[in-house]
Amino acid sequence: MITISKLNIGGIETRALSPRLEFNRATHCREEQTVLAPRLWWKAERRDLGGGLLLGCPPWKAGIPQAVTDEAPTLSPDFKVPTPPVEKEKMLANYIPVYVMLPLGVISFENKLEKPKELRKQLKQLRAADVDGVMVDVWWGIIEAKGPKLYEWGAYRQLFQMVKEEGLKLQAIMSFHQCGGNVGDIVNIPIPQWVRDIGRSNPDIFYTNRKGTRNEEYLSIGVDNLPLFIGRTAVQFYSDFMKSFRENMEDFLDADFITDIEVGLGPAGELRYPSYPQDQGWSFPGIGEFQCYDKYLKADFKEAAAKAGHPEWDLPDDAGEYNDTPNSTKFFETSGTYLTEKGKFFLTWYSNKLIKHGDQILDEANKAFLGCKTKLAAKVSGIHWWYRVPNHAAELTAGYYNLNDRDGYKTIARALSRHDAILNFTCVEMRNSEQSEEAKSAPEELVQQVLSAGWREGIEVACENALNRYDRKAYNQILKNSRPNGVNKNGPPKLRISAMTYLRLSDELLKWKNFRIFKTFVRKMHADQDYCPDPQKYIKPVGPMERSKPEIPIEEILQATEPVKPYPFDPETDMSVGGYFADFIDGIFEKFTSILG
């Protein structure tokens, strides 16, 4: 029976429904929910009123009718109760947004949006899974394909509008590299033809190994400031492209829709040399090769060596080939060239050129997007093989001068700090136990070192998985690295990444089992909180981009090479998506469904 009674609380007469009806009424007034133990909630929310208990919506819901009863109601096991705003605000500080990379060829080489109906359906699925946004490569080779400064943005505007309509945010990559020739590249999008034509008459605009093999994936940093391209420099290419992007995407930038601008700084969009190109025969776990033998970088090195008082020094000729092991070369062997004065000078020059290149392009990006409410980002490659040997050979050939007694990543983080740029790192899904012993690989220690480097230099750090993974082990590893010391129920966690970008949207991801696990992963990245469309509530507010700080002298950057012990990481995540038992249940369910056809 439904009853309505009058209560006199503090001299104010109010109307109250029967306890059961009022209880049902209360459960529907919530704005945001989480799962709590019903009896604990009951104890936490009761209020003494003349020997009775005040039941109803929590006290922060002002103006809601209250009912009095002496007994706690019987609650359904599935009952969800409101989280107090203060508690919700504290837990939201642990929320990490999840983005999903769109397919590499979502915009075709012909500058057309591919399969728009299918894509929209997939975007709806992502939004329904509480994914926060998507990442997309904005290819230089597509946009400026027809000639210098002839930019065509129509297909990308169509794509951005679709993403926006589906309620997702966007991370945009300024992709100044070729697509094709790297792990996972399934389409071919070269840099603009008119640039490659210049390379036919002057192949030294491309990275070159010691044998003279050219790599057309990205322009050599030796030509960054040389007007070899119809009167323009490579840096001017990148700057003009980004300025055009801003002009043509102004409405999306003004709408707080584009959260990050990741600036491509090398092959695969990463700040590195193309030291391990698959299309030139490299295979894992080869050490790779130095890529500084074009005439411009050769001349730069000779000039630097002469200034240092060693005009006789030349570039290395003893560092081996792509698929060598470290100890098979004189450069990387025990007590090898890399430990000599000449070797140290070369490695410092080689890595410094890379840092200066990244710094200069990010400075141009800062000027292009000045005043926009977005963040700049730069990607660093997760070269985890040969990490467990003293020479770190594969990292060194890529330009990361990282040794046991020299930090090669804190220097990069320090350079990024003047632009308030995010350091985006890869291979966060990998465990040491998954790697072959011959590779001397240590992705877990590498991730710990690089993320710690960013945090110690006061910048935000974001992550990506390096390979397509759909299993719980990979998701749990990502979760552990995303919040290395777990969730803090009283506010921001001690350590956290700013965002996670998942590789990649595909039919395989959207298969029932894979997508079900992925949705759980998203929920755990959100710290079991409901989707929050406002990033200001879970990370520091992003204001209009300000001008980069003054250039940091290279001497000050090199002070960051002093090794510092990384922050401690917990052995496992406290927000697991499940383990062996969940996999066992999945196996049983799959067998059952297969029997049923």
Image: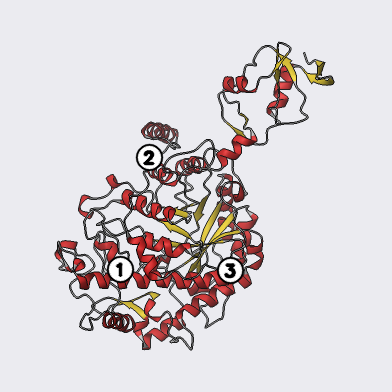
Please give the label number shown on residue 570.
2
For residue 508, side relative to residue 446 (left or right): right
Q: Secondary structure at mark 3?
A: loop
Instruction: Give the distance between the C-alpha atoms of the residues marked 3 and 1, in whole angstroms.
Output: 31 Å
Query: Residue type at mark 2?
Result: Asp
- Foreground label between 2 and 1: 2
Residues at circles 2 and 1 in contact by the CB criterion of under 8 Å? no
Query: Looking at numbered disc 1 in the image, what kind of residue is underneath it?
Result: Ser
Q: Which residue lies at the image location 54% right of the left edge and 69% below the top edge? A: 366
Tally of numbered tags: 3
Q: Which residue is mark 1?
A: 275
Q: Position of residue 229 (x, y in %)?
A: 45, 86
Q: Earlier in the sequence, mark 2 or mark 1?
A: 1
Closest to the observer, 401 or 28:
401
Residue 369 numbered mark, or none? 3
Residue 248 in the image: above or below residue 509? below
Q: Residue at x 44, y 58 (%)?
A: 424
Residue toward you, 320 or 579: 320
